Image (cartoon, rainbow, N blue to C red):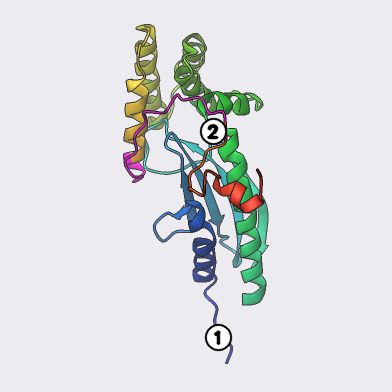
Amino acid sequence: MTTQIDQNKLLKKIAKERLNPYGIFQQGQSRTFLYDRGWFTIVIEFQPSSYSKGTYLNIGVDYNFYPRDYFAFGYGYRETGFEEFTNEAQFDKLVNDLCDLTIKRVQELDLKFQDIWTALKTVDKEKGEDTWRLFEVAVLNALASNFDKAKKLLRQVSKTKCEQDWEIERKKLVDELLNWLQESPSSLEKIKNIISQTRQLKKLPEMTLDNLTERKTTPNSTLPNEGRSWWQKLFGSE
């Protein structure tokens, strides 16, 4: 009799073993994995299909700028189309290949968002008038002390017609930020408090935000290895 393979269990086991050494952890018992960077989180989703066994792979940045209890994709998203499960050996190799891709993409995103100013350069390359994007870029500009630019973007969001409850709630926060910016803020406690509140709602661990606006001149190093970052260990970069 053929043994029934639990593809979900197999996928999560492989992903956990491969990704945990790089600081990428599983969200509960789900097929979602997270790389926590304080003011943002890199989200890795092995998305299932309702119709077939297998997985999509979605990877992107979720900003912790708006109080909500779920993760979303503010930058990046679909990495691969649907990859079907056919047998255990095939799926084992497939998931390992997807983990290789995940490690590489997380490295790239970590560099693109290594500090507020690098993140602004990254997102400025993408055009669009989506109100969530405008809101997130506004907060990035506020953190970079580009207060006039932040106010301009927030006003665009504030003027958007509100039809849904979430739009009304977002407008309240946007208007709060505008009032705060009008007072020529000398500190960023308002935004730090929003980030901390958002992290708490998402059940992320408490984290200090003292270095939130620090400019980075070298890549982030999250796992110690004689001064070398984890992607340098993996890819052999000097």
Under tag 2, what secondary structure? Answer: loop
First to last magenta residue range: 200-217
Provide the major secondary structure of the magenta segment. loop
Q: Is residue 124 above or below residue 49?
A: above
* Residue name at image x 58 percent, y 60 percent: 49
Compare marks 2 and 1 and give the one earlier in the sequence: 1
The label shown at residue 3 is 1
* Residue name at image x 46 percent, y 39 percent: 37
Q: Quadrant of the N terminus?
A: bottom right
In the shown orientation, is residue 13 left or right of residue 109? left
**Relative depth, front residue between 53 and 209:** 209
**For mark 2, does the 10 Å Cα neighbourhood hold few (<14), some (14 to 19), or many (20 or more) residues?**
some
x, y percent for residue 124: 62, 23
* Residue 184 visible in the picture: yes
Instruction: Give the residue at mark 2.
Output: 114
Q: Is residue 150 above or below residue 33?
A: above
Q: Is residue 205 magenta?
A: yes
Q: Quadrant of the C terminus?
A: top right
**Relative depth, front residue between 96 and 58:** 96
**Relative depth, front residue between 167 and 107:** 107
The label shown at residue 102 is none
**For mark 1, does the 10 Å Cα neighbourhood hold few (<14), some (14 to 19), or many (20 or more) residues?**
few
Residue lying furthest front:
226
Q: Amino acid at mark 1?
A: Thr
